[in-house]
Amino acid sequence: MGEIRIPRNMFLWSMTIVYMLAFASLYVQIPGLYGNDGVSPVRPVVPGASRDWGKPLLEQLQTPPLLLGLDTQQLMELLSLLGVLLALGAATLAPLRDSVVFLALWALYLSLCQVGGDFLSLPWDNLLLEAGFLTVLIAPLNLLRNQSFRHHDALTFWLARWLLFRLTFSSGVAKLVGYSASWRDLSAVASELESQDNPTPLAWWALQLPSWLLQLAAVGVLLAQIAVPFLYFAPIRCLRLGAFYIQLAHQVVSMLTSNLSILHLLSLALSFSLLDNEHVGSWLGHPKRRKTKTWGQALVWALTLVVELGVYVLIAYAAVLLFQLQIDWEARSVSSKTAFSFQQFENLLRQVMVPSIWVGVLSLTWELVTSMLGCVCVRGCFWKLCSLVQWLVFGAAAVALFTVTMVPYTSMERASGSRVLLEVRRAHSLVERYKLVSSYAVDPAPPSHGGRIEVALEGSMDRTTWKEIQWMYKPGSMDAAAPLVALYEPRLDRQMLLAARGRAERIPWFTGLVLRILQGKKDVERLLQTDQSQYVFSKAPPTYLRARLYHFTRPDENGSSPKQWWRRVYDEDFYPIVQLGDITLEDLLSRHGLKEMLSARPTPSPDSPLARALKQARGHVEALPGPLVQWSLLATVLAVCLLKSLLSRTLGGRKSKAAPPETKAKKPKEQAPQAEKATAGAGLKAERDYTEERRQEADRSPRKRK
């Protein structure tokens, strides 16, 4: 790897943006999810209880003497707002992209996740916590002003590359090992265009593509997530850059069809670990000057090019062999079919697992050695000692994290997982609650019969006429296109999609949601519809409520736009008809231990100055949609960065204009001998010219003619 200062700064800035969007998204939804009138309220710890320093920050703040005069909802809002402000400041001010700031952001988000339950246990939450902890190691410690000796930067930045490898490779393996047969028969792309969390209108047009092309896209996804990740550690630079662009293309296509999400931003941020200063400089219009190659360098370049082409040819050959790719020139199509069984893939995975670990070991060893050599070459005994101490600390941290990741990484294959040392498993159990490492299979399994299963809530006043409750961020109406919710994470909507694959009796928060809708709690209604005029029971809550399962599919239509975006068929009842005081509802509340928690009156809100400030902030935001809040923050960051760039260019231009007088004053002194020589030469020339003129006049005089 070459110099990585610019890619590292890109990664740090991207992480500040991800943190800002994640905290803002959660802040908007806290009252409806965790508030006193929310779906799953978080109750405070009994005052006077002994403090447990192993508990998350939020629970510790709820016990005296750190109560701060706030209730539980306001404490969560305070932590979220602190996270937004810290991330906003770090995104606009480079000195704040510091290890201490990133440690504070990680601690705040960890505290919220540990009390958030199901709504804060999504795969990208775990990914953000693991990537956030790596950011603490990657970011500089600006409290130490002298930052010229950071030879361990490449070592810590390598951890981001290893996380990217685990994320990508694990997701690809899970598609063929743990999911339905849709990936093995290459029909999963068509299924995911319907079943993914937040499909965009572009997903409908993608479904109109020929089936052979969608199957070919499935082959491309499997290759990008299983074969290409090994190129992340390739010693040849162009192979790593090629892997970066493949990852970028995969993420862009996924964004266009499933809404831009924080998971996509995290994947892109981690992929910056594959870049170097030279390549990013070419993006910015500062390409490296090409030097004339010697015959030896030209020979090495030619051999490298042959190896690169050989690698890509090998991947293409493996794709043709494993997926039986054949071109039909008459039909102008490419047929594809998996040529391996489930058992054969498991055997291949068993053979590849150990070598893949050794690839990581060799790559990490290379980074350790090169970083140590850089420390040894530092001038001065004191600075050399400081560099070696830093290398030792960060090297030990990198080796420890890499070792602990063996537990979740080898969980994909049982035989390899059983060989992990007991000491490593114990170390993993110690750090597991802090989400330092996790296992990843981020793509949900599509239904085996295609389409998507959705839960529809229906309310009634008389148990005869039923009206369906429409949601902002999930499919419901047949005539409405899927909403654009880029960057926003509607957590209740996401959990509703997951709940449709289970049973309502086993999901405590769903019973809480039913109760809050029957009670007409405004905080919960805002999760469903921010605009109260769009909420069907805005004037009065329903007397009866039920939930039904529907099977959604895309209609088979041709044309530039569909007449109907969805087609649905009733599947079965998901939740029985209930009303307030109903025996069935009371039984479910008691079964989940929610009766006392949801029915009890919340304690009066504190009236401290901080509590009043939080109420005012909530009053400004509660009527705004979540995506609008996030895009406003992002626009603010971009505007500040643009203004700083313009100011730096303007000030730089003024300095360059003020510089010439100094150079003019120095040039006469530096070039005095040359000026004297030039003056002497001019004098001799003038004297010769004068002598020639006098000679010509003498020839023309009368005396000369006589």
Image (cartoon, helix red, strand yellow):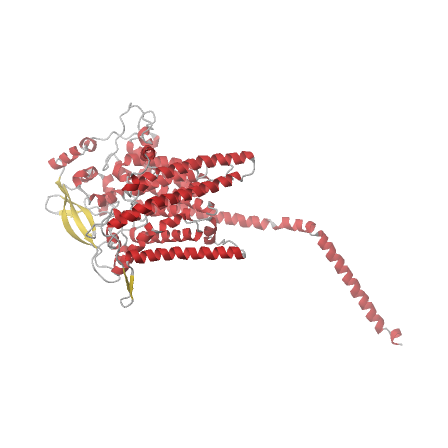
* For residue 480, above or below residue 350: below
Pinpoint residue 650: horizontal percent, then vertical percent: 51, 49
* The quadrant where residue 543 appears: top left
Pinpoint residue 261: horizontal percent, then vertical percent: 32, 47
* For residue 83, above or below residue 247: above
* 667 relative to 240 in the view: left or right: right
* 600 relative to 250 in the view: left or right: left
Pinpoint residue 19: horizontal percent, then vertical percent: 36, 41
* For residue 577, above or below residue 210: above
* 583 relative to 66 in the view: left or right: left
Looking at the rendered image, the quarter that the C terminus falls into is bottom right
Name the residue located 84 percent from the left edge and 73 percent from the top edge: 699
Q: Residue furthest bottom?
A: 706
**Front-most of residues 380 and 531:** 380
* 644 relative to 265 in the view: left or right: right
Q: Is residue 418 visible?
A: yes
